[in-house]
Amino acid sequence: MGRKRIKDRLFKRITDRIRSEEKLLTLRRRTILFSLASGVSTVAFVGFCFLLQSALVQSELLRALSLVFSDPEAVLMNWRDFGLLVLESTPAVSLAGVFAVLFLLILSAGYAVRYFAKMISLVRQTRMHSHEY
C-alpha cells in the first residue's frame, strides 16, 4: 500500500510539472509575441508622429490656432468660421493613424506586461512546489 501511494504521488508530481512547463512555454510565447508587437507599434508610432508633424506643417492649422493668441477678439467674433477653418485644416488621417497606433501600442504593452507577470508568478509557484517535496 505504501509503495502505491509513493508511485501515485510521484506520478502526480511529474504530471503537474509537465502541465506547469507547458503553461510556462505558452506564457513565454505570448510574452515574446506581445513584446515584439509593442516594439513594432513603437516604431510605427514614431513614424506616424513624424508624418503628423509634416502634415501639421503643411496644413494651415498651426497658423489658425496662433490666431487665437494674436487676435482673440476676431476669433470670438467669427467663431463659426474659425471653427470650420480648424476642422477643415486638421490632418484627420494622420491624427487617426497616430491614435490607432498609440492604441495598439498601449494594448500590446499591457498584454506583454500581463503575460510576463503571469509567467513570473508561475515560475515562483513552480519553485515553491519543487522545494516542498
Image (cartoon, rainbow, N blue to C red):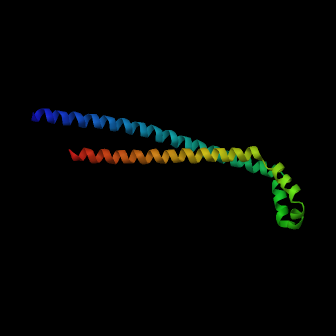
If the image is split into quadrants, where does the C terminus sit? top left
* Image point (11%, 33%), residue name: 3
Percent x, y of residue 123: 35, 45
All told, the count of numbered labels is 0
Q: At 89% across and 60% down in the image, what residue appears? A: 78
32 left or right, relative to 105: left
Residue lying furthest left: 1
Q: Position of residue 127 (x, y in %)?
A: 29, 46
- At 31% across and 34% down in the image, what residue appears? 18
Judging depth in this view, the residue of 125 and 4 nearest the camera is 4
Give the vertical position of 17 relative to 98 (above or below).
above
Q: Give residue 47's position: percent from left, percent from top.
A: 67, 45
47 on left or right of 30: right
Q: Is residue 41 left or right of residue 31?
A: right
Give how far across and how far down residue 24 sits, in percent: 38, 39
In the picture, which quadrant includes the N terminus? top left
Seen from the viewer's position, the closer of residues 11 and 36 is 11
